Image (spheres, helix red, strand yellow):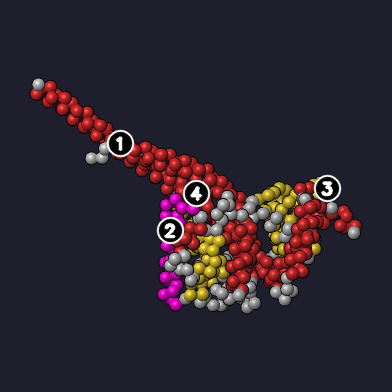
């Protein structure tokens, strides 16, 4: 039986932990709202860009000189997985899920005889993967100390990826990130970046009657890297919204667990206290009887 | 009949309203867009997007390049950097122009992508400087 003092100390320490977790929950909730608003604000651009690209891509169908960013370079030997995670932890399995997905995907690709390279965005992904895959991680970038990822960050990453692709370092690029489904669930999502996702065959073919300036090829040449940046940016925003949601959920259940623990400890503490009183009474009474 | 104008940066929708005419700075030259314009997709150079309402110039925005999608009833300007012309900072613009010039001179013309990027940036910076005093630039 622990002494009264140790019990009292435990209760106090659990109480202060509970205060921290409940404060973190509030902070995460506030940040989630902001991250969601930001993701919402970025949607029109991504939406229009997607429409434009779909219209232009349809016209490139069957063109042997189509940009390799759009149709791929004809090979699929080396895969690049871009793992998007948060920079901080304390968010349940949020970051671990991405690491797990990357490991599983790597294993299945390697079983097919492909080479896999990894680019990590976010500190936690790098932390989780660098030990076992340190030869495969070709690049990493994190946003520690920044409030939110800015578009220029996404652009820099996109440029690096395009440069590597053009240099032939990899043939297929896939983005793996947590899609913010709702506050309770974030879904690990794989999104092909290169070759760009093809719009379904007969979707836009009839519609494309845009005039194009300067011309299809050079416009796509500009549009495709930009589109890559937009997709990465969208994933980063999705990731940060999902992260705060996961953190909020995790901190909520931590707060609840701490409450239960306090209840249990308080019960033990009271029992011990009463047992002590009873013991003292018995001692006094038996002492009086002996006289 | 008005035309619906949207000016969108990657971060947010900056402006969405019905206007009478828009002039966008296409890479091949300025394009004046009236309602009923044929469908067109163009890339943009750094320059001014001019908004006309009721026959008068009512608003000017500087864009640093991007794309415009034009349909009969809609103009969507997708730009990287958007600043209201009145908010442009001459000192910043001059500094950007210096930096762009230096980068342009440093890049190897044989390196196609980097060269194109540097020249785009130079045009955008020049566009920004010109945008601050459009009258002067046209006179010069």
In this view of the protein, can residue B125 be seen by the observer?
no
Residue A9, image x and y in percent?
34, 38
- Tags 3 and 1 both on a single chain: no
Subunit bearing disc 3: B
Mark 4 → mark 1, Cα distance in angstroms: 38 Å
Q: Which mark is residue A213?
A: none
Q: Which residues are magenta?
A: A88-113
Vertical comparison of A102 with B62: above or below: below
Mark found first going from the N terminus, 4 or 1: 1
Q: Which residue is mark 3?
A: B56
Is residue A224 among what the camera can see?
Answer: yes
Question: Mark 4 falls within which chain?
Answer: A
User: What residue do we see at 24% from left, 34% from top?
Assistant: A272
Q: Residues within 10 Å of mark 4 (few under 14, many from 20)?
A: many
Q: Pinpoint residue A136: horizontal percent, then vertical percent.
A: 49, 70
Q: Nearer the viewer, mark 3 or mark 1?
A: 1
**Number of residues whose C-alpha sits closer than 10 Å to that of mark 1, classed few (under 14), some (14–19) or many (20 or more):** few
Q: From mark 3 to mark 4, how far is it between C-alphas? A: 47 Å
Q: Chain of mark 2?
A: A
Q: Earlier in the sequence, mark 4 or mark 2?
A: 2
In the displayed structure, A1 sits above or below B115; it is: above
Image coords of residue A110 (percent x, y): 44, 74
Answer few, some or many: residues within 10 Å of disc 2's Cα (few below 14, many 20 plus, some between 14 and 19). Answer: some
For mark 4, what is the residue? A244
Badge 3 vs badge 4, beta-carbon distance below 8 Å? no
Tag 2 secondary structure: helix
- Most distant residue in the front direction: A291
Q: Is residue A252 left or right of residue A159?
A: left
Residue A96 is marked as: 2
3D distance between C-alphas at marks 2 and 3: 58 Å
């Amino acid at each position: 039986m622990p002494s009264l003092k140790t019990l009292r100390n435990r209760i106090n320490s659990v109480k202060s932990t509970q205060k921290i977790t409940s404060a973190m929950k509030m902070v995460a909730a506030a940040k989630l709202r902001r991250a969601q608003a930001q993701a919402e604000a970025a949607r029109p651009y991504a939406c229009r860009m997607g429409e434009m690209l779909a219209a232009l891509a349809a016209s490139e169908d069957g063109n042997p000189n189509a940009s390799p960013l759009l149709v791929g370079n004809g090979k699929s030997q080396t895969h690049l997985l871009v793992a998007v995670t948060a920079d901080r932890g304390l968010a349940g399995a949020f970051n671990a899920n991405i690491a797990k997905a990357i490991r599983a995907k790597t294993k299945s690709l390697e079983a097919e005889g492909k080479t896999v390279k990894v680019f990590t965005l976010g500190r936690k992904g790098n932390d989780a993967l660098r030990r076992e895959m340190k030869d495969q991680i070709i690049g990493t970038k994190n946003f520690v100390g920044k409030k939110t990822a800015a578009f220029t960050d996404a652009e820099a990453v996109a440029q690096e990826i395009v440069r590597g692709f053009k240099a032939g370092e990899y043939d297929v690029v896939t983005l793996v990130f947590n899609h913010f489904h709702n506050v309770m669930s974030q879904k690990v999502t794989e999104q092909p970046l290169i070759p760009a996702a093809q719009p379904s065959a007969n979707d836009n073919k009839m519609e494309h009657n845009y005039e194009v300036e300067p011309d299809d090829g050079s416009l796509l040449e500009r549009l495709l890297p930009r589109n890559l940046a937009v997709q990465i940016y969208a994933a980063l925003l999705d990731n940060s919204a999902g992260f705060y949601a996961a953190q909020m959920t995790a901190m909520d259940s931590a707060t609840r667990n701490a409450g239960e623990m306090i209840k249990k400890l308080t019960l033990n503490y009271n029992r011990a206290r009463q047992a002590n009183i009873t013991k003292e009474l018995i001692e006094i009474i038996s002492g009086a009887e002996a006289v | 009949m008005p035309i619906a104008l949207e000016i969108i940066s990657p971060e947010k929708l900056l402006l969405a309203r019905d206007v009478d005419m828009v002039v966008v700075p296409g890479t091949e030259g300025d394009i004046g867009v009236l309602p009923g314009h044929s469908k067109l997709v163009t890339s943009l150079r750094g320059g001014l997007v001019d908004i006309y309402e009721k026959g008068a110039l009512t608003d000017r925005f500087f864009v640093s390049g991007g794309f415009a999608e034009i349909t009969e009833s809609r103009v969507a300007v997708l730009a990287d950097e958007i600043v209201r012309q009145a908010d442009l900072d001459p000192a910043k613009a001059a500094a950007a122009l210096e930096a762009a010039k230096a980068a342009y001179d440093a890049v190897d013309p044989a390196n196609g992508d980097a060269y194109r990027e540097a020249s785009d940036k130079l045009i955008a910076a020049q566009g920004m400087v010109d945008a601050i005093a459009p009258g002067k630039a046209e006179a010069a």
